[in-house]
Amino acid sequence: MHSSELLKGTLQTIVLKVLKDYGKMYGYEITQRVKDLSESRLLLTEGALYPTLHKLESEGLLKTETMMMGKRVRKYYTLTTAGRSIAKDRVAEFVDFIKTMSNVLQVQIG
Amino acid sequence: MHSSELLKGTLQTIVLKVLKDYGKMYGYEITQRVKDLSESRLLLTEGALYPTLHKLESEGLLKTETMMMGKRVRKYYTLTTAGRSIAKDRVAEFVDFIKTMSNVLQVQIG
DNA sequence: GCTAATACATAAGTGAATTATGTATATAAG
DNA sequence: CTTATATACATAATTCACTTATGTATTAGC
């Protein structure tokens, strides 16, 4: 189900990369996409996701567009130019981290 | 230098696996081994390591032997049978986590 | 009509880390 | 010879990302 502690510190990276790959998305959609991509192994909670989206927005990495779908509100997020750049950095950092961990734990990945 | 947030949640796994691979070790030695294995990318801090060792010991995953090296104290840690089993589980969990993350982030590892 | 899914949000609490501090011996440098 | 660095342990205060809990409201399925 959930990889518990390991997931910590990866949420921003996930959000940024998913937005980079799939373009404009709203919060709930992100949770579903991540659920799909991870075959239900990573389930983002709202209590973690929304504050993260707000934080990334306040840092200028995301921009928003609010829409009304019928009577229901949807807030779409898109990467800014800065966001796209940071997304790239974060993914690279993650890959580097994995390589380092593979050495320390002496495991073969892939 | 440090992979910042990503490292969180990996410390127990690192300690257990390093002890599994290298047998009896003392705290300071673990920090040096991890530094070596990671080519100075992972630098364990004492404030994180010692409480973790104490916790793993209190959970019965590690056992200790205190020695005097001249006038200096050294506390050696070894995996218990339970510890060896959990070490295996934690590494497997980590590898699984990496595979999931690779799918979500659409990156190739290895 | 009720439950689950969709869709947002925030506040309280947790817990693993960081940072700071403390003790003490050994060694290298200047 | 004294000062800085390395060795070697330990713990307390703080931080901060996340979990858990709660709240509001619409829509779809049974």
Image (cartoon, coloured by chain):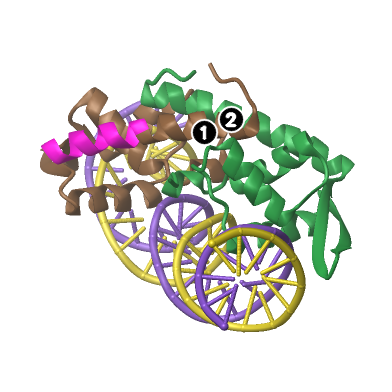
Chain colours: A green, B brown, C purple, D yellow
Query: Which residue appears at 17% of the width and 36% of the height?
Result: B79
The stretch in magenta equals: B80-92
In the rendered image, residue B103, in percent from the top left (x then y), is placed at 58, 30
Q: Would residue B16 be found to the left or right of residue B42 on screen?
A: left
The dominant secondary structure in magenta is helix
Q: Which residue carries the number 1 mark?
A: B100
Label 1, residues with CA under 10 Å away: few <14, some 14-19, many ≥20 = some
Viewer-side residue, C4 vs D12 = C4
Q: Tag 2: residue type? A: Asn
Is A73 covered by the magenta stretch? no
Label 2, residues with CA under 10 Å away: few <14, some 14-19, many ≥20 = some
Is B91 covered by the magenta stretch? yes
Viewer-side residue, D5 vs B6 = B6
Q: Is residue A42 above or below residue A75?
A: above
In the rendered image, residue D19, in percent from the top left (x then y), is placed at 47, 61
Which mark, by number, is residue B103?
2
Residue A75 seen in this snapshot: yes
Q: In this view, does A49 lie above or below B43?
A: below
The chain to which mark 1 is attached is B
Q: Is residue B81 above or below residue A11?
A: above
Query: Which residue appears at 54% of the width and 50% of the height?
Result: A43
In the rendered image, residue B33, in percent from the top left (x then y), is placed at 35, 27
Q: Would residue A90 be found to the left or right of residue A106 on screen?
A: right
